[in-house]
Amino acid sequence: MKPDITSDTQHPDWLGKPYYSLDYYLKQTFGEKIYRLSLDGGFSCPNRDGTLGTRGCSFCSAGGSGDFAADRSRSVTEQLCEAKSRIAAKTNARHFIAYFQAYTNTYADISYLRTVFSESLLPEEIVALSIATRVDCLPDEVLALLCELRDTFHKPVWIELGIQSTFNASLRHVRSGFTYADCEQAIRRLHHAGIPVIAHLILGLPGETQAQMLQSIMHVCRLPIAGLKLQLLHILKDTDLAAEYKCAPFPVFSEEAYCQFIVTCIEHIPSHIVLHRITGDGPKRLLIAPLWSGNKKHVLNRIHAIFRERDTWQGKYSTL
């Protein structure tokens, strides 16, 4: 659904926000606030099991970037029930997205994928399925399964792709195991299959300039994506990136610099792209830097204040 643009000099109506947030999209699509339930399907990763490597991407935590996900020793149904109970204790939530977050969630036998994803979609209160994965773990049979799940359960199925950067030097630096050409191909194949793509980019990778980060955003926005996650780089304990940072510290964003820069980025993102994340908050027990990012509410408040100060909004300077 495209936002209502009232004039060339007034930003679209996103219920008071200066950007097209995931919360706004979900309320417009489902008529109410929808909550995500982070699940762990017990998956691995080709960058950890020896297929491509054993240590994973250098920024990735031991939890496979799913540090807020549920306990993988529990069944999917048990994880859903426990996660719903936690949210119900604080909200009046009625409907949810099943979100497979940790590791690479299409990296398994197709029969296992069908079982766990179907189990997550069975409850009536689950209105969509979101699957985080790598660009090199989407064979044709997985694409066919995603379409099968969508058509069988009549619920949206999204893929979240960890692209991180469009610069191959950066991808090699963080040991991703794929190239940007692989990313482009995966996005186009998913789009052709009718599966919405949410692209993940990391802002602040070692050696990248702000100009390069913005260039990555612009490159990805030219592709057929439905949503974008902009993730501030978090340096987490017990990662190879943390060891690199300790031995040869590289610059990290200050709070004000990041908040100003993310607003600039959003100004250049087309207004039809849903922003699923604009900062992120790593687990505080693991966070080494930047420590200011642990106060997510404060950071978001500052970002919104800058939008007001600059009288700007998503897409104001987009040429796409």
Image: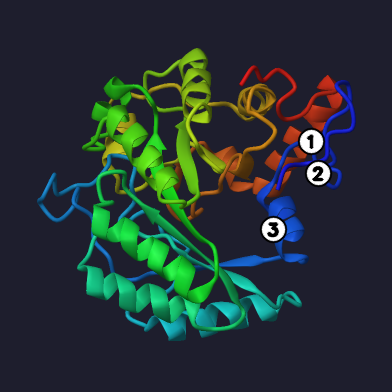
Residue 103 appearing in the image: no
As displayed, is residue 201 above or below residue 167? Answer: below
Q: Who's the residue at 71% across and 17% down the image?
A: 317
Q: Which residue is disc 3 drawn over?
A: 26
Residue 163 appearing in the image: yes
For the C terminus, which image quadrant? Answer: top right
> In x, y percent, where is residue 223?
47, 31
As displayed, is residue 155 above or below residue 49? Answer: below
Mark 3 burial class by Cα count in 10 Å: few <14, some 14-19, many 20+: some
* Residue that protrudes farthest toward the left in the picture: 50
Q: Which residue is disc 1 drawn over?
A: 18
How far apart are the two marked residues, 1 and 2, measured between alpha carbons? 7 Å
Assess whether mark 3 and mark 1 are in contact (beta carbons under 8 angstroms): no
Q: Which residue is disc 2 drawn over?
A: 14
> In x, y percent, where is residue 92?
76, 77
- Is disc 3 placed on a helix, strand or loop? helix
Residue type, numbered disc 2: Trp
How far apart are the two marked residues, 2 and 3, measured between alpha carbons? 12 Å
